Image (cartoon, grey):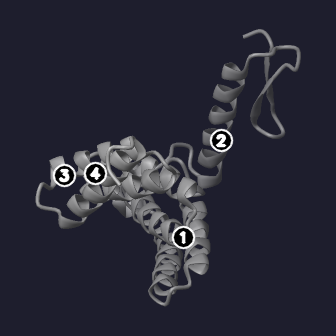
């Protein structure tokens, strides 16, 4: 392909600077990342991504960070909790791209839920929203995640979106008292904002 060359020393594809194509550059960057991870594995062909090939040493460090974050949360050190969960998420994201995604997504979900709760406690509602929005995109059928996003939306002043989140959560768990309670508070706030209720 014209404009793309291979650099033998770095073992990477290089896009000519005269070509201004961000999508092509993104694809080349992704290909270079995967290639370097395969080379770092020391094998010609990467092993199959199975739970047995999951980096257990890294998993232990990630688990310790999670436990430390939970412990900080329990003693109301929410900023420390956020810090531990953020470090853990960064470690998860550094896992080799050829490892089993099933294990990675479980770790990431656990950390995002916990960090979202810590963000809510520290009133960092936009950060909490971002975490839980990603969680909902990863797993749509968790009523607690709709509760988290509803609370974040409520405190961001997005009352109609909060109402929709609470109702979606209740569609998965109609008897969830916390979701029903938050929905009632939200409905009162919507009425108040519309001038229908004081």
Question: Which circle, 1 or 2, is nearer the viewer?
Answer: 1
Circle 2 packing at 10 Å, graded few (<14), some (14-19), many (20+), is some
Q: Nearer the viewer, residue 19 or 195?
A: 195
Against 61, is 41 above or below? above
> Is the residue under label 3 in contact with that under label 1 (CB below 8 Å)?
no
1 or 2: tag closer to the N-terminus: 2
> Which tag is nearer the camera, tag 1 or tag 3?
3
User: At x 59% / y 66%, what residue is drawn?
Assistant: 86
Taking the image as shown, residue 149 lies to the left or right of residue 9, namely left
Residue 181 x, y percent position in the rendering: 24, 63
Disc 1 and disc 3: Cα gap in Å? Answer: 28 Å
Is 193 in front, or is 3?
Answer: 193
Q: Taking 193 as reference, is 78 above or below it?
A: below
Q: Where does the image place residue 37, in percent across and percent down from the top left?
A: 62, 48
Residue 49 shows in the view: no
- Of 122 and 23, nearer the camera is 122
How far apart are the alpha carbons under marks 3 and 4?
6 Å
Dot 2 or dot 3: first in sequence order is: 2
Disc ID at residue 33: 2
Write down the residue under mark 4: 166
Which residue was labeled with disc 1? 85
Q: 165 and 107: which one is in front?
A: 165
Residue that badge 3 annotates? 170
Identity of the residue drawn at 37% across and 59% down: 106
Estimate how packed mark 3 is, as few (under 14), some (14 to 19) or many (20 or more) residues with alpha carbons within 10 Å.
many
**Hey, which quadrant is residue 147 in on the image?**
bottom left
Label 4: few (<14), some or many (≥20) within 10 Å? many
x 46%, y 45%: residue: 158
């Amino acid at each position: 392909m014209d404009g793309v060359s291979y650099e033998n020393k770095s073992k990477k594809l290089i896009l000519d600077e005269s070509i201004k194509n961000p999508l092509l550059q993104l694809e080349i960057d992704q290909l270079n990342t995967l290639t370097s991870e395969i080379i770092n594995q020391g094998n010609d062909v990467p092993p199959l991504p199975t739970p047995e090939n999951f980096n257990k040493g890294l998993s232990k460090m990630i688990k310790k960070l999670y436990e430390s974050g939970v412990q900080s949360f329990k003693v109301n050190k929410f900023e420390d909790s956020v810090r531990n969960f953020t470090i853990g998420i960064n470690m998860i994201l550094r896992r080799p791209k050829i490892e089993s995604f099933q294990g990675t997504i479980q770790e990431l979900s656990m950390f995002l839920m916990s960090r979202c709760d810590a963000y809510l406690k520290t009133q960092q509602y936009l950060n909490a929203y971002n975490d839980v929005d990603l969680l909902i995109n990863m797993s749509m059928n968790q009523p607690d995640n709709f509760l988290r996003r509803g609370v974040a939306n409520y405190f961001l002043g997005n009352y109609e979106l909060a109402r929709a989140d609470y109702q979606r959560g209740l569609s998965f768990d109609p008897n969830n008292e916390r979701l029903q309670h938050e929905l009632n508070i939200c409905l009162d706030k919507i009425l108040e904002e519309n001038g229908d209720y004081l």
